Amino acid sequence: MVKNMTYDELILRIIILLRDGKRKEFQNVLEELQPYDMAILFKEMPEKHRGRYLSFLTVEDITDLMGELDREEQLVVLNKVGKEKAIHVMNKMDNDDLAALFEEMDSELKDQLLSSMEAEESEAVRVLMNYPPETAGRIMTNRYVWIPQHYTVKEAVVKLKSFAEIAESINYLYVINEQKQLVGVISYRDLILAEPDEKVQELMFTRVISADALQDQEEVARLIERYDFLAIPVVEKNHELVGIVTVDDIIDIVIQEANEDYEKFAASGKAITFDTKSYVAAYRRLPWLILLLFIGLISGSIMSYFEDTLQQVVALAFFMPMIAGMTGNTGTQSLAVVIRGLSKEELNKKTIFRLIFRELKAGIIIGVVCAVVITGIAIVWQGNLLLGFVVGTSLFATLIIGTMAGTIVPIILHKCNVDPAIASGPLITTLNDILSLLIYFGIATAFIHSL
Amino acid sequence: MVKNMTYDELILRIIILLRDGKRKEFQNVLEELQPYDMAILFKEMPEKHRGRYLSFLTVEDITDLMGELDREEQLVVLNKVGKEKAIHVMNKMDNDDLAALFEEMDSELKDQLLSSMEAEESEAVRVLMNYPPETAGRIMTNRYVWIPQHYTVKEAVVKLKSFAEIAESINYLYVINEQKQLVGVISYRDLILAEPDEKVQELMFTRVISADALQDQEEVARLIERYDFLAIPVVEKNHELVGIVTVDDIIDIVIQEANEDYEKFAASGKAITFDTKSYVAAYRRLPWLILLLFIGLISGSIMSYFEDTLQQVVALAFFMPMIAGMTGNTGTQSLAVVIRGLSKEELNKKTIFRLIFRELKAGIIIGVVCAVVITGIAIVWQGNLLLGFVVGTSLFATLIIGTMAGTIVPIILHKCNVDPAIASGPLITTLNDILSLLIYFGIATAFIHSL
């Protein structure tokens, strides 16, 4: 019945059940819902019903719900359910989520909560928090099942059954030796298909792909993407198994990293979403803008240097915004290709050489086409053959140089181990403004007496 | 032994085994490798060994290998292994990969290959190819296991065992009724945990989240991300189960869509990678650049309209690149936030109003700060109080308008069902050039007699 209801209908239904105190029917409805649905209900229902909704949810339900909320909402829920239930929920929460949540708390509250939790769970969270942010160790979970290598299939199934609750979303059993070192992996499917007294050791897959606990999360994402895994085991230097990273976390990371690349590329300021306050948005964008303002003034001082030229042929100014703009645009295009490429490919000398050469050739082709177009327009518009020649030649030169700047600047940054994405579109555009003005007025000045 | 070898060592080992014709040992090594590894070996080994390498691989191995190669490499492999083996491989390949491969072939070759394949497999591929590109139907696979709702756990396990080969990477069984309609889902884990004579119907989860066959692949990705699924069933309008989409395909889609957003945003031209030929890159970028060239000329004609003003106060020109640049930069920043936001959130009137208001406030804050800075600089540099006032006021106004343009243009496009990402950074920058010149010279002309 529940299965075809819209969220609005569900909320209405739930509110009625809450009002009438029908716990059993409430639970029947809940069982049909996904954690994401529970979260939508929580967020969409009127504020006044939320407390009662939470009080009807079991600890397991609230744990599921927490996984779908952001940090602030999680804190609201923990506050609403009261300390005792909160501790139970925290004991059951994914460790990586919990570590992220603690990160935001002041350390006194954090220590207090950690000490109220079960020893095993709080220890696991502490371990996680010891790894640097954005590493495999920080995003791993301890909700997986491991078995000793001497187990039979039957013993493995028994252990799996006893850990049923935590084994839900993963589909491999990890096999370890006496030193807790990871030696193999076996899928649930292989367990189902095997005979009960077969040895796990003989069925397992021994060339296990694993991530190092200190490895960058983006690299871990690449491993999972590459091998089409649902989870990847995380090991310490000595190959000791310490956790696993699951594919659902990886999808979130891929999206998050793409957003970060985008933010840097547009110099739009970190983490500005639809919900960010205006003064926060302004604060995050201003550093870039002030920097660009000063760089932009360099263009102005170049023009003041060529004041005589400009005063003699004011028509030169008419083509200036176009030339500066085009140089910026072509630079942005090259930059985007290089930055996206760098996030996927390894760079060796050969690749770099080939890329620069390719962009140079593309720049020349683009330069020729655009120069021909603009020369024609300039001659027709201003009736001045030489002006057309100056504008066309300048555009040809600036397009090639703009393309090269957009290609070489990020490569140099990458080679210096600086994140190439800080060479944002606006930065390249502003730099290309300067280059284009130098070239344009340089060429114009050379011909000034004939213009 | 194989497990700690580098790729170079593995290649050496394999080449020796190929040379000595040791098929059995070769197969032992292969069993320890992931499909991705097989593909790396294939691509990295000297060309002359590839044919023999392929001849030593079983049809299953080649099928795995194919999944890791791009279209062109897949065609090379199919040609190398000979028609008979190629047909066997195609029978076993993922249908979605095969459909994508056929897309690139001329229709005669395609029809010939399709008719040589097993009827069931070629039919499945034909079905896939009937769905539009980038829909759930196009990326789904038929490699999943379904069971009728009246089955017991034991019957389900028997069916699962008989379909072991294709059931590898998915971890749910889909339950259908007599009309082939999807009515439930049960995980392998629940099967392991249940008693053999329990009814599937009673164990299964009935509020199944599914994708519509015609749904956009990006929406399917969002469903999987949201619910942390490993696979999602795909149904026709009448709720008939027609396939599933797996999480590994979704990761690829998320990456691909992020790249496409990036390309559009930078107007960098579709699908230009490090390997694209220079003339192709130039050809893909030129349409944008030519368009932007003409729009850029509008800036020039605005300046020519204000020629008198410019001639009287040439110093005005010095601040022009900075003002135009800053307006472009602030527009790009707003644009990035709006476009990334639109890819995640639903837009209703309230959200739009709030967003525009937020950006307006942010624009005012940014405008005030930058205007104060530039007024100071202009007065000190040019020693002209009024010029400082004109430049400052203009920057204040253009920053606000630039921010608004970067916010409102993509929203309008979105509302008109045009992809807002075509409002690329370069386009907004060029439009903001025009707006900023109009404002700057407008204000300057108003004060021209006092300057």
Image: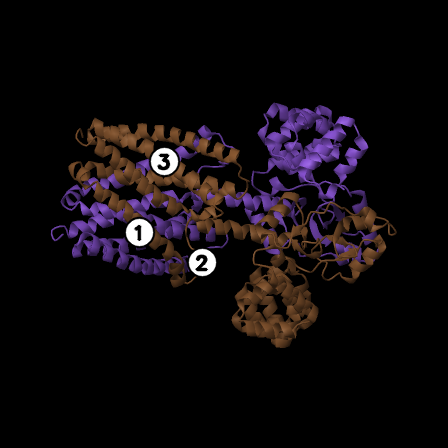
Chain colours: A brown, B purple
Q: Amino acid at mark 2?
A: Phe
Mark 2–mark 1 CB contact (< 8 Å): no
CA neighbours of label 2 inside 10 A, class few (<14), some (14 to 19), many (20+): many
Please tell me if label 2 and label 1 are on a single chain: yes
Specify the quadrant that holds the N terminus of chain B. Answer: top right
Percent across and percent down for residue A89 are 65, 69
Q: Earlier in the sequence, mark 3 or mark 2?
A: 2
Say which of B158 and A83 sits in front. A83
- Kind of element beneath mark 2: loop
Q: Chain of mark 3?
A: A
Q: Residue at x 78, y 54 (%)?
A: A177
- Quadrant in the rendering for residue B112: top right
Instruction: Quickly name the residue at label 1.
Output: A294
Q: Is residue A283 visible?
A: yes
- Quadrant in the rendering for residue A12: bottom right
Q: Earlier in the sequence, mark 1 or mark 3?
A: 1
Q: Amino acid at mark 3?
A: Ile
Say which of B75 and B239 sits in front. B75
Q: Relative to A107, is B131 above or below?
A: above
CA neighbours of label 3 inside 10 A, class few (<14), some (14 to 19), many (20+): many
Q: Earlier in the sequence, mark 2 or mark 1?
A: 2
Percent across and percent down for residue A45 are 54, 67
Q: Which mark is residue B342?
A: none
Q: Is residue B21 left or right of residue A81?
A: right
Say which of A13 and A95 sits in front. A95
Percent across and percent down for residue B42 are 66, 32
Q: Is residue B226 left or right of residue B192?
A: left
Nearest-to-viewer mark from 3 and 2: 3
Q: Is residue A18 visible?
A: no
Q: Which mark is residue A274?
A: 2
- Kind of element beneath mark 1: helix
Q: Amino acid at mark 1?
A: Phe
